[in-house]
Amino acid sequence: MQTDRRGTRLVARILLVLTVALAGLGPATGAYAFGGAFYPTQRIGNRGVDVLAIQYLLQEHGHDTPADGIFAAPLDIAVRAFQSAHNLAADGIVGPKTWGALVVTLTSGASGPAVRALQVQLNKKRDARLSVNGSFDAATRAAVVSFQSHAGIGPDGIVGPTTWTNLAWHYAYPDLSSGLCDQDPDGNGLANWATGAAIGQLEAAATAFAATGRGPVPLGDAGFEHGGGIPGHSSHDVGLDIDVWPIRTDAAQCTAGRITWQSATYDRAATRQLVNAIRAAAPGHVSFILFNDPTLIAEGLTSQYANHDNHLHVRYCERVHPSSLYTC
């Protein structure tokens, strides 16, 4: 949905303002241009662009960490070592204080892993299409200025704490080539955005499921670019709720339409594989999966909830989150 994404950003921003006002989430402050922006807490089990940025930032501080976007044991060890060295609680949780110690101010001409962290964030969250070369070149500066303007920050091209906070908080867009196809059952064409972790974890699950030969994973609604409520859903406003469709026996879930668990073309075995892939890609970070197939419910894989016969609602969670509904 790249065309929709570029052509309707203004509409998305207007929707954001209206939703924030209605939901009482609080106005933006001078330090955080997006209302309620914060550094997203990351810990072992997470995946995605925010984890990748953390890995590059640790490299900037001299830690030998892989840059694979997976928060596994080696990264947990490196984070704890960094925290100890900076007199922070060595709990392996990258929260606001650890993020604040990791980020460095960047300007034109800078180079190194911290610039790579910036570039991957801009690519995933603003489709900047930068070369991840670690060089703060003219293209990178232009992407920074564009993001700052988009976020309502003074567009000076300097990446300091305010820009880092808003960029880390900004939602990510899924790579549909990872094994996903875009479905818009409620006409919410913009609603494919979610947190960097949620998108990374979903992409990993879709890639693993695609290897089974049962076709792509049909992505329903996730959220808007800057959060807020979306039509037809009572949640999906903080970037951690994502809907996917069940799998069909003909593997045509991306072309032949949505089904329910009661349909003759419903493939329970393949849907079970999908649920297991979603959970395996985000250990400790799946709060629940709502889907009314009684067999999967009996197996402890999904939970019953009204109006969830024809889609799976995945709720991701984090160790620390402003809403207790999203804490693991």
Image (tube, rainbow, N blue to C red):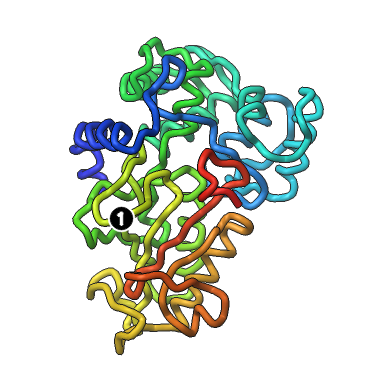
The image shows residue 105 at horizontal and vertical percentages of: 56, 15
Count residues near mark 1 (Cα–Cα under 10 Å), then give few for <14, some for 14-19, many for 20+: few
Q: Nearer the viewer, residue 270 or 34?
A: 34
Residue drawn at the location 21% of the way across and 59% of the way down: 186
Residue drawn at the location 48% of the way across and 69% of the way down: 209
The image shows residue 246 at horizontal and vertical percentages of: 37, 73
Q: Is residue 103 left or right of residue 242?
A: right
Q: Quadrant of residue 261?
A: bottom left
Q: Nearer the viewer, residue 193 or 255?
A: 193
Helix, strand, or loop for circle 1? Answer: loop
**Residue that carries the numbered disc 1 in the rendered image:** 233
Q: Is residue 114 left or right of residue 240?
A: right
Residue drawn at the location 45% of the way across and 61% of the way down: 314
Q: Nearer the viewer, residue 83 or 322?
A: 322
Residue drawn at the location 70% of the way across and 24% of the way down: 61
The image shows residue 96 at horizontal and vertical percentages of: 61, 29
Q: Is residue 8 left or right of residue 313?
A: left
Up-down relation of residue 34 to residue 305 (above or below): above
Q: Quadrant of residue 283?
A: bottom right
Q: Amino acid at mark 1?
A: His
